[in-house]
Image (tube, rainbow, N blue to C red):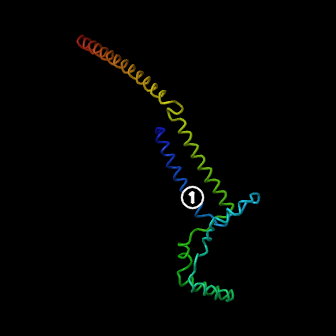
Amino acid sequence: MADILTQLQTCLDQLATQFYATLCYLTTYHDHSPAIPPPNVPTAIPQLKKIPKNAPPNTPAAQPASEQAQGQDQKDQTPQQQQQQQQLGGEASGGTQEQNKDLPPRPDSPNTFAQRQRELARDLIIKEQQIEYLISVLPGIGSSEAEQEARIRQLADELREAEKIRRRKRKQMKKLAESIDGLLEAVSRGI
C-alpha cells in the first residue's frame, strides 16, 4: 500500500481525468437546445437572452450557394425523385459510412443524458470525498507547528533510546555467541 501522499496525488490525477472526461461527454452529447427560463424567476429571461445559442450539430452553419440551390430543387421534387437522387449520390460518394466519419455523434436522449450526467456528478463527488478523507488522515492535520516540532523531538528521543537498547542487546548476543562457540569447541574436543 502506498503512503498517503502518493494516494492523494493519484486521487487528484484521477479527479482531473474525471473532470476532463465529464466536460468532453457534456459538450459532445448535449443536444445544444436553448435554455428554458424558470417560470418563477422574473429576471431570468433577460439573463438568458445574453447567452449565445449554439447551432445544432447536425445543421451546418453556412452552406455554399450551390448547395442551397440544390436544397431548393429538392423541395420541388417528388419523394420518388428525391429517393433516386439519394441513391445515386450514395453510390457516387461511396455510401453514408464515409460521410458519417466526419460528423459528431448524435446527442443522447434527454433521459439518457440526464442519467449519465447524474452518474458523472456522483463519480466526481465520490472522488472528492476520497480526497477529503486522505487529507484528514494526514499526520499533523489539526495541530500547530510547535506541537508538531515537540512531537518530532519526542519521537527522536524514543528512537535514540531504542538504538541504545539495540546496541546493548547486540553486545549480549555477541557474548552469548562466543560462549556457545567455546562450549561447542569443548564438546568437540571431548569426543
Q: Quadrant of residue 177?
A: top left
Compared with 101, 35 (above or below) is above
Mark 1, residues whose alpha carbon is within 10 Å: few (<14), some, or many (≥20)? few
Q: Could you say which is closer to the camera, residue 175 or residue 119?
A: 119
Q: Quadrant of the C terminus?
A: top left
Q: How many numbered marks appear?
A: 1
Q: Could you say which is closer to the camera, residue 175 or residue 76?
A: 76
Identify which residue is drawn at 46% across, 38% down. Answer: 3
Q: Position of residue 38 (x, y in %)?
A: 73, 59
Q: Position of residue 9 (x, y in %)?
A: 48, 44
Name the residue at the right extreme.
40
Residue 161 falls left or right of residue 58: left
Q: Quadrant of residue 187?
A: top left
Name the residue at the left extreme.
189
Q: Amino acid at mark 1?
A: Leu
Identify which residue is drawn at 41% across, 21% down. Answer: 157
Q: Position of residue 16 (x, y in %)?
A: 52, 51
Q: Could you say which is closer to the camera, residue 131 or residue 119?
A: 131
Identify which residue is drawn at 37% across, 18% down. Answer: 165
Compared with 127, 188 (above or below) is above
Mark 1 lies on a secondary structure that is helix
Q: Could you say which is closer to the camera, residue 94 or residue 185?
A: 94
Residue 90 falls left or right of residue 161: right
Compared with 179, 58 (above or below) is below
Q: Quadrant of residue 26?
A: bottom right
Residue 123 falls left or right of residue 139: right
Q: Position of residue 163 (x, y in %)?
A: 37, 21
Identify which residue is drawn at 58% across, 86% down. Answer: 88
The residue under label 1 is 23
